[in-house]
Image: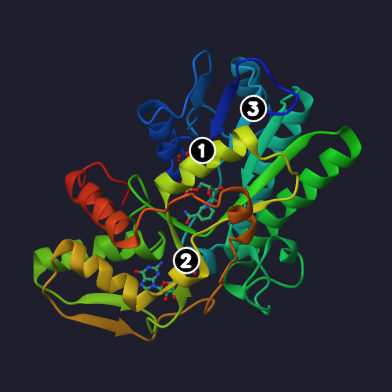
């Protein structure tokens, strides 16, 4: 099997954001599940190796590792409530990181870059299910417009690098990701790590679990290890510039209430669950179609949601002292 069209040598893969939720999952699949191949070099970067908002540091780290391929994950990332507070920082940090990484990849002759968009950058007012053609069809939800517009520009840049320079830079579009090494900070993180952390504390203290908002919004969640396996397929096989949604099916979308119940079951939490409707619900739903993914990979099997939640809860409890929180 050809590794990548037009590329037959061993790959040197640089993973930006290699110490985050998705980066750690890719590292595990590469190192422990046979996702890597003989002769390949994989480097997983943290912000300590280079601050990618800084062009000179970005250039230096690319010159040091001389990647042939880049998985670009590094970003300022947060849940609904951090996005609502820090739209300007989400916009500026992510614009700088993305422009530095993509332009340096271009200047240093990287063969392929796979960047990361998100289903939360799609238009707020839309028809469902959302598909890959709809990214730029209207304003994003007001809660995260800084992050969304910055991410949308990756797609603009990818198309422009191809048009002007023939570069094969592409992007994936995951839904809400969760798993080991997530950011379990209650104020800043996403809903599942936030609820897992809150349930863990509530269980210890014998207090109620506070779910924020009404519990009615709906989300498709993807386990970080499933996403990592799909990322490797995209890196090796997917040859389009246009992005691809990486998501469980529409039928696997769950409400926030159902997600909270799954965490309650996984932790064996016996206390009361209450909904704080003074807190925001955010976008009601962002139901995405995985039809394009299914055309390429009809047989890919996603980890059942309850099993993935259980594994994540177990990881958090076992790594409580060192987990990001
Ligand atoms: P994460 O856990 O917060 O990790 C972020 C990573 O980016 C870390 O490795 C961090 O390094 C690095 N980073 C942040 N700022 C940096 C900077 N200025 N310079 C260099 N590195 C920097 O994020 P994640 O959830 O894995 O997200 C990975 C990608 O998936 C992102 O592009 C995100 O937008 C996208 N995505 C995430 C979700 C989700 O639900 N989490 C959903 C859709 C798409 P340190 O460890 O050194 O801080
Ligand atoms: P989103 O999927 O991009 O909107 O971001 P989140 O992962 O932060 O999910 C936000 C949804 O979960 C909203 O409907 C929130 O009201 C709800 N939610 C319930 N409890 C929590 C919590 O503890 N933290 C977060 N971030 N969201 C919560």
Q: Does the CB distance between marks 1 and 3 fall below 8 Å?
A: no
Please tell me in which quarter of the rendered image ligand 2 is found: bottom left
Q: CA distance from mark 3 to mark 2?
A: 29 Å
CB at mark 1 closer than 8 A to ligand 1? yes
Q: Which residue position holds label 1?
A: 17
Label 1 vs label 2, nearer the camera = 2
> Closer to the N terminus: mark 1 or mark 2?
1
Q: Which residue position holds label 3?
A: 69
Give the structural element (helix, strand or loop) at label 3.
strand
Considering every residue shown, the one lying at the far right of the view is 164
Q: CA distance from mark 1 to mark 3?
A: 14 Å
Query: With respect to residue 124, does 205 lie above or below?
Result: above
Q: Looking at the picture, how far across and down is residue 109, in whole percent?
A: 76, 23
Residue at the spot 29% in from the left edge and 62% down from the top edge: 306
The answer to whether residue 298 of the structure is visible from this angle is yes
**Which of 113 and 226 lies nearest the eye of the viewer?**
226
């Amino acid at each position: 099997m050809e590794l990548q069209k037009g590329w037959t040598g061993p790959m040197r893969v640089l993973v930006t954001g290699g110490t985050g939720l998705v980066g750690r999952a890719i590292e595990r699949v590469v190192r422990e599940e046979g996702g890597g191949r003989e002769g390949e070099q994989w480097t997983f970067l943290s912000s300590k190796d280079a601050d990618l908002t800084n062009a000179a540091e970005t250039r230096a780290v690319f010159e040091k590792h001389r990647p042939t391929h880049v998985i670009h994950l590094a970003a300022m990332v947060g849940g609904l409530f951090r996005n609502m507070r820090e739209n300007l920082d989400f916009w500026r940090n992510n614009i700088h990181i993305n422009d530095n990484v993509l332009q340096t990849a271009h200047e240093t002759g990287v063969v392929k870059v796979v960047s990361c968009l998100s289903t939360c950058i799609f238009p707020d007012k839309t028809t469902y299910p959302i598909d890959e053609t709809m990214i730029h069809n209207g304003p994003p939800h007001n809660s995260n417009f800084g992050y969304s517009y910055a991410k949308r520009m990756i797609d603009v840049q990818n198309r422009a690098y191809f048009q002007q320079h023939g570069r094969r830079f592409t992007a994936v579009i995951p839904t809400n990701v969760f798993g080991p090494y997530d950011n379990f900070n209650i104020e800043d993180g996403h809903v599942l790590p936030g609820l897992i952390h809150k349930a863990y504390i509530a269980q210890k203290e014998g207090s109620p679990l506070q779910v924020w908002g009404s519990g009615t919004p709906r989300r498709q969640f993807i386990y970080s290890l499933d996403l990592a396996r799909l990322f490797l397929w995209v890196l090796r096989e997917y040859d389009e510039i246009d992005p691809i949604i990486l998501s469980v099916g529409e039928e696997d979308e769950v409400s926030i209430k159902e997600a909270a119940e799954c965490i309650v079951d996984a932790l064996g939490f016996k206390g009361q669950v209450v909904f704080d409707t003074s807190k925001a619900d955010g976008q009601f739903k962002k139901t995405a179609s995985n039809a394009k993914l299914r055309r390429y990979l009809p047989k890919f099997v996603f980890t059942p949601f309850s099993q993935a939640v259980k594994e994540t809860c177990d990881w958090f409890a076992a790594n409580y002292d060192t987990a990001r929180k």
